[in-house]
Image: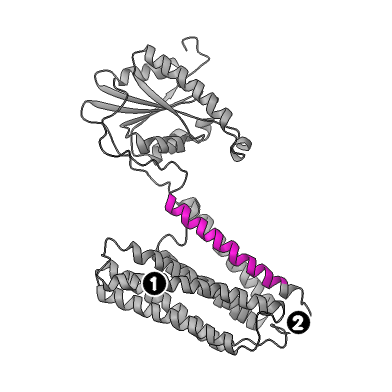
Amino acid sequence: MARNPLRSEAEAFRFVLLTVAYFALIVAASTVSTWLAVAVFLALTALVLWRWARRTSREPPERASVRRGGTAGERRILVVANETVGGAELLEVLRRKAEGVQGHVLVVTPALNSPLRHWASDEDGARAAAQGRLDASLARLAQQGIDAHGEVGDGDPLQAIEDALRTFGADEIVISTHPEGRSHWLERNVVSDAKARFDVPITHVIVDLDSPST
Amino acid sequence: MSAHAEHHGPPIANQSSRINASVLGMFLFIASEGMLFGAFFTAYFFVRVVNPEAQSWPLEPFHLPVFVAGVNTAILVTSSFTMHWALQSVKRGNRAGLQAGLVLTLLMGMAFLVTQMLEYARIGFNPSDGAFGTIFFGLTGLHGAHVFVGLTLLAVATVRAFRGHYTPEHHHGVEIPGIYWHFVDVMWIVVYATIYLL
């Protein structure tokens, strides 16, 4: 994200000083020649843009601290999955994690959408499809004896996790994806980005929907 | 397993968005101000571009008081330093520094505004004197309105500072007017450099 020069008074003050220096150099150059002023303007602007771009790309992702909501003997698990939400591997992992503890499971299914529909705010279809997958998943979890509730999340899985964590203090996050090569989320480094961004243990479960067991 | 955790008290506020609300607010503010000033600057540069034969700018018979405006610019830039001093003082628990910094900033802001009004009275043309007159008064007047808003915010912060408000931990009421004041300062540097000097 772009860095806000007016984020704090100290940064705004620094911005004032830089603005003074920027225009002082341009005005000084203009006393020599108009074209020199134009050249200084272009050079300074290019320098500012280059430094801004370099600084933005170097900034590590902000690590969000997660508010834990569970008590002793209680485990709160946030599950993020889309097409693989009803996969056997995921159900098995959840069943194992819930053994011997009082578990709370929140399943979040991101409403995946095409970029065009996203920008046009046409998300009704994506949300309806995600709700359908979620309902089927919750029914399968109930069959396994796992009591869970769920919600449809943002189309961006990382944002969906962040939104869910605001109201669900998770002890652990389980992200379910297709195998490598068929998973868009893995291609976009969703799992590694989530590990860098959220201060909570993250388990990655691979669900192969083409497998006979699934 | 239970589906719901125990929770007492009011429900936790849900802030579902891709960007922090205060950061988003500041970005929207900067964007709206950029478009506002940008519209005036576009008109100004249009007036300059359609007069390519001009040997000097502004065209006759307009004359701008560059020196007086330069002194005014120095006053405003200095007020940013006193504003920054006020903030640094409150962060260190120096109440006298906070009060002195705010009072000096307020006085310099008022001096800027009074000087600008005197400049308007003596400049020798008015907003109805052609496109340049309109744009000049429009741009500098728009900035003057921002200074007035900034002074109002600073006056409130100053009164509160003398009433014992603000601590090293809680000084949001000074920080926000400070950010706004620096923004007003930046905009004036752009206006002064563009209209008076270049």
- Give whichever of discs 1 and 2 has the lower sequence position: 2
Output the chain of dot 2.
B
For the view shown, which residue lies furthest in the front direction?
B128
Instruction: Give the Cα distance between marks 1 and 2.
Output: 42 Å
Up-down: is B8 above or below A30? above
Colour mapping: one colour
Task: Identify the secondary structure beneath mark 1.
Answer: helix
Which quadrant would residue A87 be assigned to in this image? Answer: top left
Q: Nearer the viewer, residue A22 or A129?
A: A129
Residue A26 seen in render: no
Q: Amino acid at mark 1?
A: Leu
Q: Residue furthest top?
A: A212
- The single residue placed furthest to the right in the displayed view is B53
Residue B28, magenta (yes or no): yes
Q: Which residue is labeled 1 in the image?
A: B154
Marked residue chain, label 1:
B
Which quadrant would residue A205 be assigned to in this image? top left
Q: Which residues lie in the magenta part?
A: B21-46
Q: Seen in the image, is B60 located left or right of residue A118?
A: right
- Residue B11 horizontal side relative to residue B66, left or right: left
Amino acid marked by disc 2: Ala
Classified by dominant secondary structure, the portion drawn in magenta counts as: helix
Residue B155, percent across and down?
Answer: 37, 73
- Residue B79 is labelled as none
User: Mark 2 falls on what kind of element?
Assistant: loop
Q: Residue drawn at (36%, 19%), measured in percent from left and top?
A: A93
Write the residue at 43% across / 41% down. B16
Residue that numbered label 2 is attached to? B54
Total numbered labels placed on residues in the image: 2
Residue A47 spot, x, y in % from top left: 56, 64
- Which quadrant holds residue B191? bottom right
Q: Residue at x 30, y 32 (%)?
A: A171
